[in-house]
Image: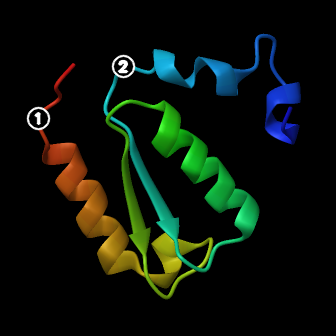
Amino acid sequence: MTDYERFESPPAVQRLAEIKRPLLVLVGERDVPDIHTIVKLLEDRVIGARVIRIPRVGHMLNMEAPDAFNHHVASFSRSPDPG
């Protein structure tokens, strides 16, 4: 059991496959390993999750790379909702 699985009953991590809405996950390539572990869980367990790794930034990607952040969020928000 991961640290993240201990906080919910049933653990939220076990319910990720229940997410049926579009999900955008933005992560900086220089973010800490724990964040990358969480992103990998989301990528593996949420069907259709869209993960974008932004190069040369860490955890504060909206501040470190605002143009890339805004571009990806705006593009995702204009995408048709398949649900």
Q: Residue at x 53, y 76 (%)?
A: 29
Identified by mark 2, the residue type is: Lys
Q: Position of residue 32 (x, y in %)?
A: 72, 70
Q: What colour scheme has been applied to the protein in the rendered image?
A: rainbow
Identified by mark 1, the residue type is: Pro
Q: Which residue is mark 2?
A: 20
- Circle 1: element type: loop
Q: Position of residue 31 (x, y in %)?
A: 64, 73
Q: Is residue 49 left or right of residue 29?
A: left
Q: Nearer the viewer, residue 2 or 78?
A: 2
Q: Which residue is mark 1?
A: 80
Q: Position of residue 61 (x, y in %)?
A: 51, 73
- Circle 2: element type: loop
Q: Residue at x 76, y 11 (%)?
A: 10
Q: Position of residue 70 (x, y in %)?
A: 30, 67
Q: Residues within 10 Å of mark 2 (few under 14, many from 20)?
A: few
Residue 75 position by quadrant: bottom left
Q: Residue at x 51, y 64 (%)?
A: 27
